[in-house]
Amino acid sequence: MINKRIKIDYDKEKIAITTICSHSSLQIFHGARQEGFRTIGICTKEQERLYSSFPLASPDRLIVVERFADLLQENIQEELLRENAIIIPHGSFVEYVGATEILSSFSVPLFGNKAVLPWESDRAKQREWMLSAEIAVPKAYSDIAAVDGPVIAKLSGAKGGRGLVSARNGQELANKLDAKMLDQYTIQEYIFGSRYYPHYFYSQIRSRLEILGIDRRDETDIDELYRYRDFIDHPPSYVVVGNQPLVVRESLLGKIMKYGEGLVETSRRLFSPGLFGPFCLEMVCTADMKFVAFEVSARIVAGTNLYPLGSPYSPYYFTEAMSTGRRIAREIREAASQNRLDEIIS
Ligand code: AMP
């Protein structure tokens, strides 16, 4: 998987940390600058002004494209290779450029292991991965007739919480779902509890797993449903529009760490050399204090934007204010200085 050409051609002094201007890019540019790197942002014409307007987080160079998928064009890839770019993939990068295209037609070095993409972008494979890591997951139903309690149905590939339907039972679900689209839904048990989304970072260079922060997504309009008591028939939506900071009761931290370790360990067997860099587990902590996870994000998540100057956990690892964006840049810097860049890019 690792592209050997990268090892040979890489000029570590001139690395440009590069990403698409969206999602967590300001944090990534800010962190890269703190670690002394040059930065490149890929943006559209309409974004140019916004992304030039942050004195401490605007990239050193903006490459303007018509649409993000243009990154796949040969001339843009060649330009990025000339610039010694390392791409930091985030949610919008994978969404706009496409997992299949990244695997088949993108040769600019990427921070992290590309081999995780097929595992991350398929809900069934994610589940297999979590189960092999001994992570508790919601019960899954293969069809509506089997539903025996509260459920949530998700459209495959839906991102940002769009297209979710919750129901008290199978009958209610059958009434709510579009019969023509039934085969496109994943149906799972609705887990009641508090949501915790820990931000992990596995360092190949230091061989250690860190918890750099925790957030909870702010989802409209389910998170303010109490305000709509007068409109009791209003079906809630789960669209992600922001994030809230969180710390977890300290006695629960060990369970969160164990889940993260499980994901890293099993990934080595499933897609060598495995999962490294930033990743996140979306989970619910139930009333009996068990964590049930329903999604893995194998890259930087937008919830890390809460902590550009470090989180309530990052001071336990670093004396400097350490965001996840800066942590990525630190890993690249340490890898470059030890001649180990080929271990952290693909
Ligand atoms: P997802 O599309 O899997 O990221 O889910 C989006 C949102 O739906 C989550 O952030 C949760 O608020 C909610 N959700 C997803 N799965 C479950 C579940 N099994 N039980 C309860 N809530 C869920």
Image (cartoon, helix red, strand yellow):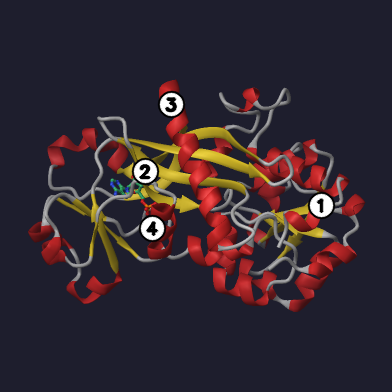
Give the distance between the C-alpha atoms of the residues marked 1 and 3, in whole angstroms: 35 Å
- Which residue in the protein does label 3 denote? 248
Report if the beta carbon of the residue with label 1 is closer than 8 angstroms to ligand 1: no
Of mark 4 and mark 2, the one earlier in the sequence is 4
Which of discs 2 and 3 lies nearer the camera? The answer is 3
Specify which label sits upstream in the sequence, 1 or 2.
2
Q: Quadrant of residue 222?
A: top left
Q: Secondary structure at mark 3?
A: loop
Residue 187 x/y as whole percent: 25, 60
Q: Name the amino acid, label 4.
A: Arg
Q: Amino acid at mark 2?
A: Glu
Q: Is residue 98 left or right of residue 281?
A: right
Provide the residue designation for mark 1. Answer: 340
Q: Residue furthest left?
A: 171
Left or right? Give the position of 279 relative to 185.
right
Name the foreground residue: 113 vs 91: 113
Nearer to me, 47 or 280: 280
